[in-house]
Image (cartoon, rainbow, N blue to C red):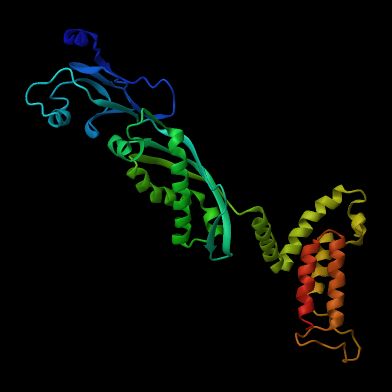
Amino acid sequence: MALMDFIKKQFIDILQWTEESDGTLAWRFPMAEMEIQNGASLTVRESQMAMFVNEGTVADVFGPGMYKLNTQTLPVLTYLKNWDKLFESPFKSDVYFFSTRTQLDQKWGTPNPITIRDKDFGIVRMRAFGIYSYHLSDPKAFYQKISGTRASYTREELEGQLRNSMVAGMTDLFGESGVAFIDMAGNQDEFGKAMMFKMAPMFAEYGLTLDSLVVQNVSLPEELQKILDQKIGMNMIGDMQRFTQYQVANAIPEAARNEGGMAGMGVGLGAGVGFGQVMGQAMASAMQPAAPAVGAPTAAAPVAAGGVSADEVVATLEKLHGLVEKGILSQLEFDAKKAELLKKLS
């Protein structure tokens, strides 16, 4: 009976993994009732590593190459099995293969906006996303921390853990750096390098090497982005003269294309005065207090504490409103300037 059992046993002559599908990081060689013979061949292809595990204890690790299994090539396993000088054949041991290929185009991002403290805007909620790549570099650490005794472990199973860890690291990075959102959004390359430096130790703990990390976008939620756009617009209005010149420069070619041309905007081409000059003079007078007429009595309209009379404010607003009707100023810009002028009367 013992002889028949021995004959029925299957012996392994070649251990190898052909990686028939993509995305598998760890794969256990199917042993079943099979045993490994003395002198059996182990083939480890490029972008692979192999590891022997004896009764739950990691033994020998192999890089790419072809090996003949004996006491010389399996020193740790020989020690664990208490082999002296003779290789006991056949023997049983778990054999795991690991893919060390670079896992490209892995995506990370914030599923929900994260709340951070920003030195320009106070408390804000922001989003960010990008791509990264990594490869398995330490089979022992990966086996002990991640894959364990599973028959196989895939890239998709690890994806959620890596993505969530990266989002947590990004949140810490924002909090520690104190860099304003505007500066971070404008320097995404440097942000990616800083984030990669921070996340590399976490990947190494899992037996992985982080090869690259790219930040593709840093943004605010839509409602906050609108507020940011308004703030940028108000900063432009702060330099009214330059802003008006910019608006006029853009309005001239547009007016020329419209029916009626420049005359349609109430500007006669035969008047001898260019449109930009007319509008510049209008804005200059709108922004300056009106001079008293020659021979007029010095007792003018009541003057507010800020040195501007009510009549001057009204006249200025009328001129600015005319610019709104001509499309030179937007309603938002007019309202902002109106509020500014009315404050001078208080």
- Quarter of the rendering containing residue 262: bottom right
Q: Nearer the viewer, residue 297 or 227?
A: 227
Q: Could you say where residue 119 lies in the image, as x and y percent from the top left?
A: 54, 66
Q: Nearer the viewer, residue 242 or 204?
A: 204
Residue at 79%, 78% (x, y): give it: 342
Instruction: Report the side of 44 relative to 115 (left or right).
Output: left
The image shows residue 209, relative to residue 181, as above or below, that is: above
Q: Quadrant of the C terminus?
A: bottom right
Q: Could you say where residue 115 lies in the image, as x and y percent from the top left?
A: 54, 58
Q: Could you say where residue 123 lies in the image, as x and y percent from the top left?
A: 57, 64
Residue 213 seen in this snapshot: no
Residue at 28%, 36% (x, y): give it: 140
Q: Nearer the viewer, residue 80 or 289?
A: 80
Instruction: Report the side of 15 relative to 338 (left or right).
Output: left
Q: Quadrant of the N terminus?
A: top left
Instruction: Report the side of 246 relative to 13 (left or right).
Output: right
The image shows residue 215, relative to residue 335, as above or below, that is: above
Instruction: Report the side of 173 relative to 185 (left or right).
Output: left
